[in-house]
Image (cartoon, rainbow, N blue to C red):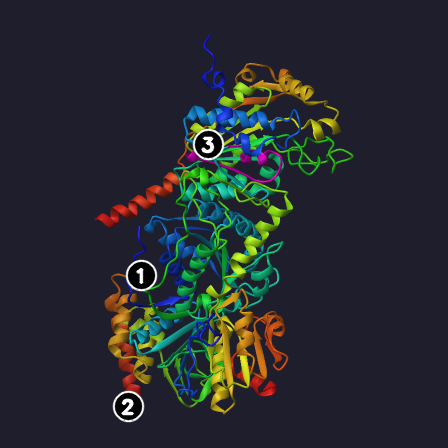
Amino acid sequence: MPHRITSARKLMQGNEACVHGALYAGCRFFGGYPITPSTEIAEGMARLLPKCGGHFIQMEDEIASMASIIGASLTGTKSMTATSGPGFSLMQENIGYAYITEVPVVVVNVQRGGPSTGLPTKIAQADTMQARYGTHGDYQAITVAPASVRECFEQTVKAFNFAERFRTPVTMLTDEVLGHMREMITIPESGELEVVDREKPDVPHEWYHHFEITPTLVSPMASMGDGYRYHVTGLVHDQDGFPTANPNEIKAKMDKLRNKIVRFADEVTQLDVEMVDDAGIVVFAYGTTARAARQAVHMAREKRIRAGLIRPITIWPFPDDQLRELLAHVRRVLVVELNQGQLIHEIERVAPKTCKVAGLTRYDGEVLNPVEIFKRILEVK
Amino acid sequence: MMADPIQSSNVTYDYLRVKKRFPNVWCAGCGIGTVMGSIIRAIDKMGYSKDEVALVSGIGCSSRLPVYCDFNTLHTTHGRAIAFATGVKLAKPSLKVIVVTGDGDGLAIGGNHFIHACRRNIDITTVLINNQIYGMTGGQCSPTTPHDSFAATAPYGNMEKGFDPTTLAKAAGASYVARGTVYHVQQLDKLIYGGLNKKGFAMVEAFSNCHTYYGRLNKEGDAVAMLKLMKEHAMPVKAAKVLPPEKLEGKFLTGVLWDVEMPEYCELYQNLIDSFQEKDKE
Amino acid sequence: MTTAREHKTHRDSKSHKVPKDDRYEVRLSGSGGHGVILACVMLARAIGTDPRRNVVLTQSYGPEARGGAVRADLVMAKGAIFYPKTMKLDLLLTFTQEACDKYCQDLKPDGLLVVDSTMVTKVPIKNSYGFPFIRLAREKVGHPMVANVIALGAIAELTGIVPREAIRAIVKEFAPKGTEEKNLKALQVGFDVAKKAKRK
């Protein structure tokens, strides 16, 4: 059943927009567990999924939630879950499982303060690195991060597109403020945004390899019950999915997992760049923080300070090449984030020697406001 | 007398990934292979096609079972088989979903998923192979290791008590609960068949032997000796009803221990979806 | 490969002239039960009816929002709204003395304060209006629950931030079935008392 919603302008929370984005992308399964500040996503899914012929289930914990969506996706159903820090930690083992078994799923993390129970009702961007390195073993993450209610919708669609295109788990990082913030949004018409579906096999059963190493390194994916009886395991496996201890096969699998994302990273990179071409100082921020940063950059421009903004919408894979080019003629870059300093290390890694890196952090549960960022621009420019 | 139709057929071979995956990982004499045969014969008797069966497991000796079977097979993370299976079943209720788990996988790390699947009464048949120990990691204590038994992590005897998986499943709300052993193979076939036939959450405990660890550490002997112990201590639930309590000492009950009709989760959900579709038509 | 600059760049103006900021910031505050959050949602929705207007609504969650002061913040602008939270308020509505004392300092020097005059007796600034919203709700509409709608009418009339018709349509849309008339009457009471106060 299609997801029906009138395309009139609506006042909507970020979390609600995420629900509608998921349904627009074709999500028909949600397994979740209540946690502030993400719960509105589960509630919206519980209300709307059965109306679209989909399934919502409240699982007993976040480990089970993650497991259930992987199981559902294997049947050919686009699936997702939503959580916040503590739940995201519990999901990590099975995120690794989805990665090695190449099952497309979407995980939304509406970030709050941590570690541990932390600040359930307060904003943070402290899971930035967890989204990248949270699960054990070598791992290539794809993570998107919207900054407005409209983007919550669009980036949820993108998250599904990337998951389906690359057969991999994709994380969307939002935050408490964005999740609960209301803005006017016009829901896109059907067909207005691109929706990508996983490639299915068209070969006879006996020729099918569930983990075939193809030119794009992404293998067509049969659904359970479609007549291709394959094996799925979290053990490192060969192209048929059977466990292997052969070093050549192990390396081939690990290379496939890495390169299918690393080699095609350009396809997922999304950068929002403003006033950087003549900038002496560039502010680097994502999500809600980037909105304060943009205001601060505009304040600086009003004072004739040549400031610019780089906002990664896709955080992982980190846009190394694009940033190296953008920062080539910039003297200062100011990394602004709601944690004790995470993305600053990535910027330090990619910034040319001619570009000095400074940071501005806040981790008391409050947002950084434009005045604070503007003052820091004045200090480091 | 007519032979049982399940037993007279030699069907297991057709359902195995004979060329691809054998020999298997289990020790010679391990009971898990016997359970695999029972599961296959029960599936065959149900008349399921290979394509419509999803066999899901977690981690451990018992959880290696699906890789040898030619169904849709899903070998998941430790303890999480039932949670994965819940997603498979709910997203595609036409699939016949069977979980194979062990006492450690299903009752320790996966205990929470186990009780909640019982409570939800989702149409999944779980075969819990209970050998009272962690085999794959080398004989550590499990949630069904009896009090005072020895294990690699209970070198001075187990201070804890063991779970009874059948009591647990019944209390948590399962529709069908049964116990068999790998000695009583014909009965085990029937019990698993009964579980597959049940609309709702069915749990069949298959009592099995780990002579490599449990038998050795507790001086119960080799596989044959352990099977003999099963023969001596198993008591069919029907027979037990007419015996005085003193005759039941040291015995464990086998057979169908609990069997009720209850609304099944996927059906309830489908009713909800249908009600919206009907509203749409109006 | 595309260059970084071309690469999905969303915005890159050539002149880098920053448009004049026309932000207008509102805070509605009170304590639990006053319906300030709902009032703010209705206000945001009514403002958003105009496709040329952008609006962002944030609210404080968590322990501080329970029992004590409740608040909802709204930012509106013709241009894009970057920073979603309020910085300096143009308009503050308070139902309680506590909220008034706490938030008055967030007003701009020329910002407007509107209070429930029966609850807020100490008004710290001159540029202010007081109306007995809760008493008016009881006496003129017969229901204390609609005090928030009267307040909405009053601030719409005083500031002109939203056309009467727009707020009317939204109040009607949000009213529980059977209470539409009562809510519209409350709104009208708000318009009327504010209009009268303005003339003075």
**Range of magenta residues:** B51-69
Measured as percent of width and height from the top left, residue A97 is found at 55, 49
Residue B57 forms part of the magenta stretch: yes
Seen at 48% across and 26% down, the residue is B14
Do callouts 1 and 3 point to residues on the same chain? no
Measured as percent of width and height from the top left, residue B86 is found at 47, 42
Query: Label 3: which residue?
Result: B175
Measured as percent of width and height from the top left, residue B119 is found at 48, 39
Q: In which quadrant is the C terminus of chain C drawn?
A: bottom left
At numbered mark 1, what does the secondary structure look like: helix, strand or loop?
A: loop
Residue A372 to residue C171: above or below: below
At numbered mark 3, what does the secondary structure look like: helix, strand or loop?
A: loop
At numbered mark 2, what does the secondary structure look like: helix, strand or loop?
A: helix
- The chain ID associated with circle 1 is A
Is residue C87 something that shows in the picture?
no
Q: Foreground residue, B20 or C173?
A: B20
Q: Foreground residue, A287 or B25?
A: B25
Q: Foreground residue, B175 or B230?
A: B230
Seen at 51% across and 25% down, the residue is B13
Query: Label 2: which residue?
Result: C199
